[in-house]
Image: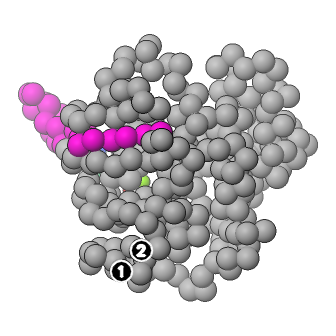
Amino acid sequence: MNLIEARDLTLSLPDLNAKKLLRPAPRVTILRGLSFAIPQGACVGIVGESGSGKSTLGRTLVRLYEPTAGTLTFAGTDITHLSAEAIRPLRRDLQVIFQDPSSSLNPRRTVGSIVAAPLKLHGVPDPAARARQALDEVGLGAAFAGRYPHELSGGQRQRVGIARAVALEPRFIFADEIVSGLDTSTQAQVIALLKTLQREHALTIAFVSHDLSVVRHLCDELIVMSAGEIIESGRTAEIFDRPQHRETQALKDAIPLPEIDPDWLNA
Ligand SMILES: Nc1ncnc2c1ncn2[C@@H]1O[C@H](COP(=O)(O)OP(=O)(O)OP(=O)(O)O)[C@@H](O)[C@H]1O
Ligand SMILES: [Mg+2]
């Protein structure tokens, strides 16, 4: 079964770069007719050059943006144009983990209250206890609940971001460059954690990265984007062995050495 299906998904937004006084406000098309399916329980890698639309796709899949054209279904429900109110019950199922944990973690709140906040919002019973349990699950331990984000390393902060999402028991996580900026061994640990969580919670994950070597170890399927379009998609191994596009080859060539030790990932 496909958890997510996008057909001809198109998004245009008011152009932030256009002159303010122009009427009607000019729009810029960012996603151009994307069609793909994400099977239940799969991990799909999304790669592509900077500005190709990966983050915008994530915001659209979790319906922070309303598609301009095309259709988007989640678990068989057409969510393309659901109103804010109608989408509310699905919010918990659709989570994003952002690139930069330091900007998405409130510096004035403890880690425990950061993880508990969305639980409260969704009316989960005993949010503080559930938050401690989630911190445990991501390998930080419940004792981290009393700490502040600035007291943590980059890898630990990213684990907090993961705990906050996973605590809600979502069905889909859009993980947007969550290991960029971490050193290689910390990257490998965070990816191994994601793999474990995926298995234990039957999560469906879209994993965005600039780095094909990371995606190769985590994701069975791959979507390659360029300029708001999908230029290539399919089994990761196949695309890796026989890239069809110059852009894909370029991403492959950009793989930093040494590569991640696969043993880390299977630990
Ligand atoms: N409201 C907007 N107005 C104008 N341009 C926008 C707007 N929102 C996004 N864009 C542009 O859309 C394109 C896609 O942006 P997006 O952030 O999705 O790319 P990305 O693939 O995530 O890039 P990166 O790898 O750098 O994170 C970029 O060129 C961006 O500048
Ligand atoms: Mg991005």
Q: Is residue 10 above or below residue 197?
A: above
Element under disc 1:
loop
Any magenta on residue 166?
no
Instruction: Tell me where residue 133 appears, x and y as whole percent.
Output: 84, 37
**Are the residues tagged 2 and 1 within 8 Å (C-beta)?**
yes
Tag 1: Cα neighbours inside 10 Å, few (<14), some, or many (≥20)?
Answer: few
Q: Amino acid at mark 2?
A: Glu
Q: Nearer the viewer, residue 9 or 42?
A: 42
Tag 2: Cα neighbours inside 10 Å, few (<14), some, or many (≥20)?
Answer: some
Instruction: Tell me where residue 91 appears, x and y as whole percent.
Output: 53, 26
Q: How many marks?
A: 2
In the displayed structure image, the side of residue 130 where residue 27 appears, left or right: left
In the displayed structure image, the side of residue 147 where residue 202 appears, left or right: left
Image point (82%, 52%), residue name: 139
Which mark, by number, is residue 238? 2
Q: Quadrant of ligand 2?
A: bottom left
Q: Is residue 238 above or below residue 85?
A: below
Image point (50%, 51%), residue name: 206
Q: Amino acid at mark 1?
A: Arg
Coloration mode: one colour
Q: Which residues are magenta?
A: 3-28
Furthest residue toward left: 23
Q: Is residue 95 above or below residue 38?
A: above
The answer to whether any part of residue 217 appears in the image is yes
Element under disc 2:
helix
Any magenta on residue 24?
yes
